[in-house]
Amino acid sequence: MYSFLHRLASSSSARASHRLSYRWTFWWAAFLVIGFAPATAGAQQVAAEDVDREFVLEASMLGYRGVGGEIDGVRNPVLRAARGERVRITIVGVEALTHDIALERMDIKSSEVLDVGDRASVTFVADGPDTYFCTIPGHRAAGMEGKFELLEEGGPEVAAVVPTHDGEPVNVDFEDGTLEGWRAEGDAFAGNAVRSADNAQGVTGFEGSRWVSSGDTITYLARGTLVSEPFTVTEPFVSFRTAGGALKDTRVEIVRAEDDSVLFEISGYGGSTLRPVVVDLSPHVGEDVYVRLIDREHGMSGIPYIKDNKLAYIAFDALRLHPTRPQFPNELDPSEIRILPPLDYIPEGGYSGEDAVAAMDVPEGFKVTLGAAEPDVVRPIAFTLDDRGRLWVVEAMTYPVRAPEGQGKDRILIFEDTDGNGTLDQRKVFMEGLNLVSGIEVGFGGVWLGAAPYLLYVPIDSATDKPAGEPEIVLDGWGYQDTHETLNSLRWGPDGWLYGTQGVFTNSEVGKPGTPKEERVKINAGVWRYHPQKKIFEVFAEGGSNPWGLDFDDYGQAFMIGCVIPHFFHVIQGAHYQRQDGEHFNPFVFEDIKSHGDHVHWVGDYGPHAGNNRSAAVGGGHAHAGAMVYLGGSWPEEYRNRIFMNNVHGARTNTDILERQGSGYVGRHGPDFLVANDSWSQMINLRYGPSGSVWLIDWYDKNQCHSPNPDVHNKTLGRIYQVSHVNDHWEPVDLQSLSSLELVQLQLHRNDWYVRHARRILQERGPDRQVHAALKRMLREETDVRHRLRALWALHVTQGLSDRDLIGLLSDPEEYVRAWAIQFLAEDHEIPARALERMARMATEDSSPVVRLYLASAMQRVAPEDRWETVEALAARVEDSEDHNLPLMVWYAAEPLATVDMDRALQVALNAELPDMLPFTVRRVAAIGGDEAVKSLAASVALAENRQEQAELVRGLDELLATDDVAQQPETSR
């Protein structure tokens, strides 16, 4: 059979004019190889104007919201239709963002809406349950997802009984316009609690002409409770109608009168149409119960870009008793309600600096000290520490709108605590007149500033603490389309590079001044790095949302935090991470690495934004700023290698516990460390210093969110705090005054502040034989792998390692030493032949998933033709098939191999044990197109070992043959 297919591919595929007949001939051959299998079921399309049932949904990042009928106002409503009905779902854009709608099982999707008022739709015949969602990257994860279900066939109508109390009907219809028999507390059910059809305020679904409500879209702020008189459960089923907010504190309760225990409760569902609810009370027949309506919600958002929830009320009508279970076509199922918890109580801020400190809570043994406050510091957006432990702080007076060139108002301040009491008693102005500064680092004789569109270097006159010259534009082309997602979080890495991050809605094309557009490096989300001596810029890892925090642990592993999507990512060289929006620059990534956290810091299924101000129990909300892996040495051991991040909406500092898992890490939620108890608190970054204490900067602003409107943000406030533990020890320090051998000894210091600064100073001073000898002795003799890694990193940055040294370290017993040797060998994109051979053996033999992860990264840095043996071996490691990182990291290395040799790439994929290698390779070959791609896919069908592999290849070939014009030249991505 293989020879038949091969001859077929060789002869017929060469004649493009016979492509259609070849396609049918191939399908017949494929039938002989894999047997008959039914085609994947797709949607039965219908004419757009010929529908039985239509749904309209407003599309926004907060989800799809129903328009009209029983779904009116419901977020991500369950859409129902009868089997065989012709259905149309139309979406309407309500914001200037891209959205669409797709049905997962039916595999259909609409065109995109791009702006307010744009409309798009899908039409189909209902034949089973499905899930609808937005396909734009990050939107489904943010909450744009709902269910489509078939309507149950209606049963016979069930008799309904009005409950009685002392022989009289209970007032459960309110048709007399009163609350007779009910007891009200608070103001929610006072006055006009009984609503009528004459003033419905958009409410529908009521029986008769009246119902009761704690509010409506105008009076939603009111709160209170309403309790009915008791009645006997004479029938096993109860029904009633309800509407209102899907909030924990807007609900209906059925309560047993004897002991006041709640037998059933249901919140509103997020809509204004009163929908039927059915409750099985058969275990309580003969008992007395009462109804309690609860509204403790005011619905106020407190967030500028999220409107108040005007459904923050509970409505109720038409309670009935039934002998058998009734059926309603629009019955409200409690399982479809996604309830938001009660609002967090965070006291309103506006405190003085001293009062803000007094309001904070920290664990026992810690204390917070006010280091500085307005007017000494205003709008601190970024800071770092120099080699004396002084704070260099950026005041962002220009934000949020970049000023015309030369008119910037940002400045850099230098603060110092001269006596170790936590108060910054000395203050200097280093520089003024800067423009849109968002990041700062000190080193190599100057200050490095992220100030889009530039990365600047300003030399320092150490005698005067003033600039020693004009700012140098190191790199330009940084975007600032979204001025709260510009380059930020500058930090020296253990490898001697300057690292930073940038957000997804800012588009940058980075290069040295004068670099042509085609030679510039694009980034619009991810981690970048720049080498201060080699003058090289590169993207280290791509993806994320708006990362505003980056740090390294004891093993040199990087971690970034961000917003909107899950917050925590282990940063791996060459990785592509989940994006909040947009596509990866390489269209052949196909799938990206998701969060390394096992949790999020918001609650509910309504998406990240809806959890703000309701998520204290799990961390406070979706927006994070600043990241610090604590290695300060003096805090209790439980805090070492724990990552700290500031939660903006939660007014607190979260911690995640870093735990090794496979090739990388998982972040588990640790206890929140600092709770500000102050809604104005906007802590942006934090770093530990030489004493082991931690400094934090606080933007301090009533407005919690970015706005391009300069008048929204306060321009007069700012704070710096110190968090210290009883174990912390302060003493004056000036590392620049130490000898190089003294700096080498600091590589063993428990406080990594000393380690990092000493290593960078050694890098500045350059190669030194004595330094190299001491560091090699440390690398050889130390038993703690963390100390050995420090020696290795210091040797690398001081140019003390040869290729021979690094190749020798590939056999080191410590996995992280082997891993870092791999990274350093690939640093310059040219791995020696001997090292490549050794890496190929390691891909087969090495027991460490960490080493295999570094191999996958390294292979992305060499020419595709040099990757074959290592990639093939990595792809065959079955033990990595469930790893969080390795399957995709190996794919990223394998992706361009198809452009070198399609047949061999497909063979590697057929031999692979990692998931998705075959379907991704098939897609990659099909994207190249041309007769050679057709031939390779056709020939590979006979080589496949099982029906699943064969079907995958046939599917890819069919898609390729179905195109109108197959490209004749290979398409490459590298």
Image (cartoon, helix red, strand yellow):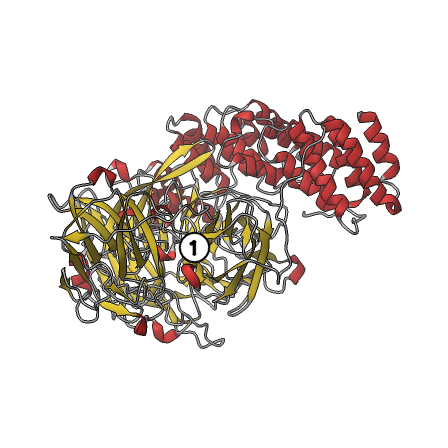
896 sits to left or right of 536: right
Q: Position of residue 679 (x, y in %)?
A: 25, 62
Label 1 residue SS: loop
**Relative image position of residue 941 (x, y in whole percent):** 74, 31
Nearer to the camera, 231 or 903:
231
Tell me which residue sits at (87%, 38%) in the image: 12
Q: Is residue 681 above or below residue 741?
A: below
Q: Residue 97 in the image: state x and y as whole percent.
A: 51, 64
Q: Nearer the viewer, residue 589 or 768?
A: 589
State the image quarter where residue 227 is shown. bottom left
Q: Residues within 10 Å of mark 1 (few under 14, many from 20)?
A: many
Say which quarter of the image contains residue 547: bottom left
In the image, residue 406 lies at what x, y percent? 47, 76
How many marks the image carries: the answer is 1
Q: Residue at x 41, y 57 (%)?
A: 75
Residue 873 against residue 348 in the figure, above or below:
above
Picture quarter with the N terminus: top right
- Say what amino acid the circle numbered 1 marks: Pro
Say if residue 686 shows up in the picture. no
Residue denoted by label 1:
77
Q: Is residue 434 left or right of residue 887?
A: left
Residue 190 seen from this side: yes
Camera-side residue: 427 or 630?
630
